């Protein structure tokens, strides 16, 4: 019983130690690098064993330099972390989908346009329509 469990544990743990990167090339010439074996439609051109990441002196120095540059950038640009930021109430602009609170000028321009169009009847011109629409636009924009 113990021997069977040992063998089962050995088979489960053994693949975790060996990790590979596979370079696969398709028949069309596309190259992919992946951590699983190449599919049947492509061929394996290279297999590289990948070990665990080991931090070296140069990688530590690079990591520290990147952290210092990031800190300097934050200081220059006035970066403030979100948990320390002071929130101020910004003046709210009316949203396009919200009704206009003071739309008397807009309503007057629309009413004028309607009366002029009724008076003009079928003798409307493009210039007249354009001028009326411009008036409404100017009165109704925010």
Image: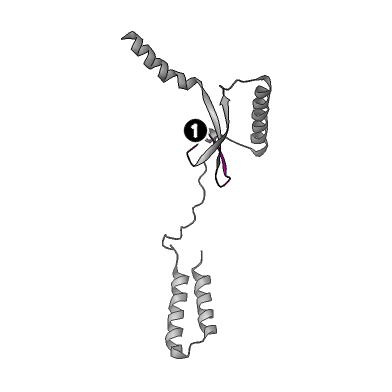
The residue depicted at 35 percent of the width and 9 percent of the height is: 3
How was this image coloured? one colour
Q: Is residue 120 above or below residue 50?
A: below
In which quadrant of the rendered view does residue 103 lie? bottom left
The residue depicted at 51 percent of the width and 33 percent of the height is: 83
The residue depicted at 67 percent of the width and 19 percent of the height is: 57
**Residue 72, percent from left and from top:** 67, 32
Secondary structure of residue under mark 1: loop
Residue 32 falls left or right of residue 65: left
Residue 86 visible within the image? no
Residue 48 falls left or right of residue 118: right
Does 28 lie within the magenta span?
Answer: yes
Q: Main secondary structure of the magenta part?
A: loop
**Residue 129, percent from left and from top:** 50, 81
Q: Nearer the viewer, residue 78 or 105?
A: 78
Q: Which residues are magenta?
A: 27-40
Residue 84 visible within the image? yes
Q: Nearer the viewer, residue 80 or 73?
A: 73
Which residue is tagged 1?
A: 37
Q: Is residue 29 above or below residue 104?
A: above
**Residue 10, percent from left and from top:** 42, 15
């Amino acid at each position: 019983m113990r021997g069977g469990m040992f063998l089962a544990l050995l088979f489960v743990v053994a693949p975790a130690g060996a990790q590979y990167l596979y370079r696969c090339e398709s028949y069309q010439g596309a190259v992919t690098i992946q951590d699983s074996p190449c599919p049947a439609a492509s061929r394996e051109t290279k297999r590289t064993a990948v070990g665990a990441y080991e931090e070296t002196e140069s990688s530590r120095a690079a990591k520290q330099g990147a952290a210092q540059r990031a800190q300097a950038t934050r200081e220059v640009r006035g970066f403030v972390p979100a948990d320390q930021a002071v929130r101020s109430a910004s003046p709210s602009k009316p949203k396009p989908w919200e009704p206009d609170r003071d739309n008397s000028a807009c309503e007057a321009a629309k009413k004028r346009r309607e009366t002029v169009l009724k008076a003009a009847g079928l003798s409307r011109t493009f210039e007249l329509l354009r001028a009326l629409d411009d008036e409404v636009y100017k009165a109704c924009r925010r």
